[in-house]
Amino acid sequence: MKLRHLIICAVITTSVPCIAQNSIENSPDSILPDSTQYVPAALTVNPTEDHSPRLLMIKANALPWAATIMNIEAEIQVTRQITVSLPIWYCPWFIAEKHALRVAAFQPEGRWWLSEPGYGHFGGIHATVVWYNLKWNSYRYQDRGRPLLGAGITYGYAFRFDENWGLELSAGVGYLNTRYDRFYNTYNGQLADTRNTSYFGLDHLSISLVYHLKI
């Protein structure tokens, strides 16, 4: 009897730690990851995500400035090769008796750059919105009911002088439509008629000084 009791005690002694160990390993808590190594998915950083600063370009077109038409343009990078620009033209005065132009104009544009924004070749698609009052020879022309409207395409090339300064050359063609009143070009000139006209051809030309900065 004593020998049998010794064998039973030995079996129980060796089995209990194994059962306890199995119970711990199979417990629900054991399936959780090590808290020292666990990082919530919302806090993980994707090493391939692009956090580089975006390019902002501020421009002035020398051609309208030469005709006393104030203008400024802002262009911002939205993807690696795409930018969006908005030039604004404004001239509130007549500078001559027979030939003069009052104008407020916008020509927003989306651009695709062949290499990188702010340098090299680019193409674009633009829209045109213009309010005008033009004196030319015997008549004065003024938009009626709505501004001049149009759309077109652009090609250009940008040079970089250094990190901040550059020069941009561009030209565009498009379709324009306007409805306007035609007045006799005299003081308080009477209305001659009202016309509607369309045009297809050059609708954009710029030689612009550019300042680049990162935001």
Image: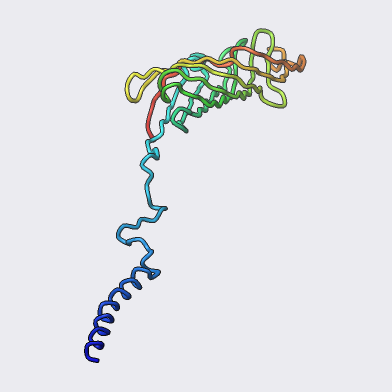
Q: Nearer the viewer, residue 14 or 141?
A: 14
- Measured along the vertical axis of the image, is residue 132 above or below residue 53? above
Where is residue 13 shown, x and y percent of the image? 25, 80
* Residue found at x 38% / y 27%: 212
> Which of these two is toward me, 70 or 163?
163
Give the quarter of the figure containing the N terminus.
bottom left
- 68 on left or right of 116: right
| Residue 26: x %, y % from top left | 37, 69
Q: In which quarter of the image is residue 197?
A: top right
Using the image, determine if residue 99 lies above or below residue 32.
Answer: above
- Residue 212 in the figure: left or right of residue 96: left
Task: Answer with the quarter of the image where residue 39 lies.
Answer: bottom left
The residue drawn where x is 32% and y is 75% is 19
Residue positioned most to the right: 193
Q: Quadrant of the C terminus?
A: top left
Q: Which residue is drawn at 45% across and 27% down?
A: 81
Q: Residue furthest bottom?
A: 1
| Horizontal relation, residue 201 to residue 11: left or right | right
Spot occupied by residue 55 in the image (x, y as percentages of width and height): 41, 31
Q: Can residue 207 be seen in this view?
A: no
Q: Which of 108 and 50 is in front in this view?
A: 50
